Image: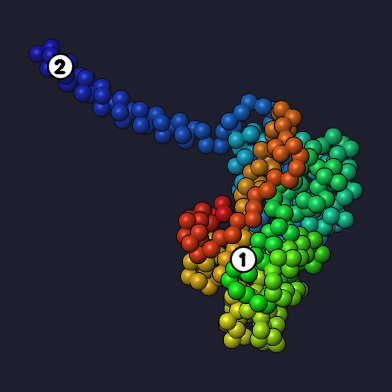
């Protein structure tokens, strides 16, 4: 009888242990969500970018930054404005709040130079991200995180050469953005064919479509349209269709719609600079600097791209793009 009771009790305990252990793991995982992985002070880091409203690219950057902020016990603030002077005003507001670290973009460097200097004078460490790798060190930032825009453009030009392209139009959707100019400059440096710049009003998508359509109708030799942002790629595809052009559309940056268009063959390739990684690493490197005076790469730019994404690659990245992290 005792042997039987022992066997039953053992089986019962084993069952409870298995179930209870699983439940305990689930509770632990749930409790860990939103909890810092470190016990350092709750510093406040602010990111101020040149993004306009509703730009999915910067949503992805923020996702990376916010997840790193949770891990590093950081209070994360975000502000943005497409106008350089207003972006600088937002940075000044963060300085006035005495934040513990700043992350800024330098798409409009002339507007940002003085305020970055003020941050440095106030003892606030600054990291630049996405735009301004060539000005980052000069302005006094600790480092820059992103892709070198000229190198990214050169990667596009080389890809166009491999595809046998002869004439491309590079569509610039934001006036005064030096990073966009550098991308098109890079394409021109490596592409053996001809490249023409086309300036469009990026905040007016119908204008973007009509401008590209008119360009393709007026020049039948154009066999490639290069857009500088993922939201503009589908519009360029529509413009080519309306113009009766067989020009291939290629784009900088990746999102779920671009990944889908790559898989269907509507787009040739995309250049991914990994915005999630830019946001994540910017926060994480500021934390490392505050905690341990670490600086990855010795202060030299930390590159997150370019990565050429084709139809084959897009299938693997599609699930990440759909969840908003690629």
Judge from the rendering whether residue 68 lies leftward or rightward of residue 137; answer left or right: left
Foreground: 139 or 65? 139
Q: Nearer the viewer, mark 2 or mark 1?
A: 1
Judge from the rendering whether residue 199 lies leftward or rightward of residue 212; answer left or right: right
Provide residue 46's location: percent of width, then percent of height.
74, 43
N-term mark: 2 or 1: 2
Foreground: 9 or 321? 321
Q: Is residue 40 visible from the viewing direction of this image?
A: yes
Q: Which residue is mark 2?
A: 5
Provide residue 47's location: percent of width, then percent of height.
73, 46
In this view, the residue farthest toward the left is: 1
Mark carried by residue 312: none
Asked where in the image residue 57 lies, by quadrant, the reply is bottom right
What residue lies at 81% left-to-right and 42% top-to-bottom? 141
Q: Which residue is mark 1?
A: 159
Q: For the residue carrying disc 2, how many other residues have a C-alpha within 10 Å: few (<14), some (14-19), or many (20+)?
A: few
Judge from the rendering whether residue 74 lies leftward or rightward of residue 264; answer left or right: right
Provide residue 11's location: percent of width, then percent of height.
21, 23
């Amino acid at each position: 009888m005792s042997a039987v009771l022992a066997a039953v009790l053992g089986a019962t305990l084993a069952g409870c242990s298995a179930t209870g252990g699983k439940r305990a793991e689930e509770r632990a995982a749930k409790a860990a969500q939103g909890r810092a992985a470190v016990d350092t002070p709750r510093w406040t880091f602010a990111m101020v970018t040149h993004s306009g409203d509703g730009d999915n690219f910067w949503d992805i950057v923020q996702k990376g930054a916010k997840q790193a902020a949770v891990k590093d016990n950081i209070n994360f603030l975000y502000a943005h404005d497409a106008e350089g002077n207003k972006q600088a005003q937002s940075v000044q507001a963060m300085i006035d709040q005495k934040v513990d670290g700043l992350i800024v973009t330098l798409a409009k460097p002339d507007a940002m130079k003085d305020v970055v200097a003020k941050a440095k004078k106030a003892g606030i460490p600054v990291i630049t991200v996405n735009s301004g790798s060539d000005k980052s060190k000069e302005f006094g930032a600790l480092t820059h995180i992103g892709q070198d825009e000229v190198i990214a453009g050169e990667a596009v030009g080389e890809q166009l050469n491999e595809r046998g392209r002869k004439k491309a139009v590079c569509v610039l959707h934001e006036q005064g953005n030096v990073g966009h100019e550098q991308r098109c400059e890079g394409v021109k440096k490596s592409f053996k064919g001809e490249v023409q710049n086309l300036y469009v009003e990026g905040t007016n998508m119908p204008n973007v479509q009509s401008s590209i359509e008119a360009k393709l109708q007026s020049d039948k030799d154009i066999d490639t349209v290069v857009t500088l942002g993922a939201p503009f790629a589908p519009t360029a595809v529509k413009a080519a269709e309306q113009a009766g052009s067989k020009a291939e559309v290629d784009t900088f940056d990746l999102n779920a719609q671009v990944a889908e268009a790559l898989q269907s063959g509507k787009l040739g390739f995309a250049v991914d600079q990994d915005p999630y990684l830019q946001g994540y690493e910017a926060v994480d490197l500021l934390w490392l600097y505050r905690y341990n005076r670490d600086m990855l790469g010795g202060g030299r730019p930390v590159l997150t791209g370019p990565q050429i994404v084709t139809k084959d690659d897009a299938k693997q990245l599609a699930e990440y793009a759909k969840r908003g992290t690629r």
